[in-house]
Image (cartoon, rainbow, N blue to C red):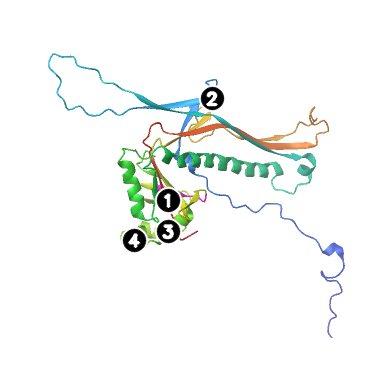
Amino acid sequence: MGFDPAAILVSDALPNLVATHYERQAIPNLKANTPFMGVTKQRPLPLHSGNKVQFYTYALLASNTDPATEGSVGDPVAESTTKIAATIGQYADFINSSDLSMEVAIDDPALLQNLAGELNYRLALTLNKLVIITADSADAIDGDVNIDLANGSYLTAGDIRSAVQSLKGVNARPLSADGRWGGLIHPAVVQDVLNDASANGLTDILKRDPAGQKKLLGPLSDDDVFEFAGVRFQQTTTCPSATVDSQTKFNTYVVGEDAIFSVFLGKNPQNGTKNYKLMIQNAPANGSSSDPARQVGGWVSYNVKYTNTLRPGTTQTLRVIESETQGA
């Protein structure tokens, strides 16, 4: 004996069967890596010390191959300094939420905490971009900063080596204590470097060593995507591009010590800590004179006093390689 078809189907007209379950935890959005602050040297602007910070460097003295005249005091050596100043700026934003939206939100763990994560990313992007703007201004001071590869050329291991030796040629020092230079590179340009299979290209070098083979075959980390010629590269989509001679070119940065200074108002951060923070606040339980009925439930905010600057003088200790890419 056969069975009759089911009498109740989801596609039928019972409205209680047609419903949507809303996942309480948001799917992570696609945030960029923001590593540019990491190639700067942080210096404090102490409280109650004005709104500007000034750095200086002594002029280099030349050698003196003339023997001193016996019995004669001679003339003193003249010395001078070069200065550069930067003015603190204030960067502030907030997101507030009604009490009703906080009470009905399905966010896990809570609406304000999730909004704080998004606002914190906005702050990271802001500081990252300010460093990029400063780095890209260095060519106006030192014409050796920008290395513009010819149209149709893609970044190679040889270009990276040339950038490092260019910095060595002005007596620049590496960024970190272990002798490594800082490198910042777009993922599309990483593809060009690793796809270069020519003799003495990076892939040709890496494939000859088990550790290098592992690098080629395994996943590429953002924080240490590859290392060559003493440059430890981080990859980030925030590396800017520009149109040069009708061609889109991406900037790759090789950074030495004291190339860019970051200055926060307040004490100097120690051991990677920060002297700024994101604030998460619930409104007063009994309201306030500006919100007597307490219809604003809470807010998240940041308030950062910050500036950055290049090193003083006309010799800069970073290089910006401009190259087309096959990966864009």
Q: Distance between the residues labelled 3 and 2?
A: 44 Å
Q: How far apart are marks 1 and 4 (CA)?
A: 23 Å
Observer-nearest residue: 323 or 209?
323
**Does the magenta portion include 235?**
yes
Q: Can residue 229 be seen in this view?
A: no
Q: Distance between the residues labelled 1 and 2?
A: 35 Å
Residue receiving disc 2 = 51
In the rendered image, residue 32, in percent from the top left (x then y), is placed at 55, 49
Quarter of the image with the N terminus is: bottom right
The vertical placement of 272 against 231, above or below, is above
Residue receiving disc 4 = 204
What amino acid type is highlighted by mark number 3? Asp
Q: Which of marks 1 and 2 is in front?
A: 1
Q: Earlier in the sequence, mark 1 or mark 2?
A: 2
Residue shown at the point (56%, 31%) measured from the top left: 89
What amino acid type is highlighted by mark number 2? Asn
Residue receiving disc 3 = 192
Q: How far apart are marks 4 and 2 (CA)?
A: 52 Å
Residue shown at the point (76%, 42%) measured from the top left: 102
Predominant secondary structure, magenta span:
strand
Q: Residue furthest front?
A: 245
How packed mark 2 is, by other alpha carbons closer than 10 Å (few <14, some 14-19, many 20 or more), is some
Observer-nearest residue: 226 or 201?
201
How packed mark 1 is, by other alpha carbons closer than 10 Å (few <14, some 14-19, many 20 or more), is many
Residue receiving disc 1 = 322
Q: Earlier in the sequence, mark 4 or mark 3?
A: 3
Residue shown at the point (77%, 36%) measured from the top left: 296
Is residue 181 shown left or right of residue 293?
left
Contact, mark 1 vs mark 2 (Cβ under 8 Å):
no
What amino acid type is highlighted by mark number 4? Asp
Is residue 239 shown left or right of residue 93?
left
Segment tinted magenta in the rendering: 232-237
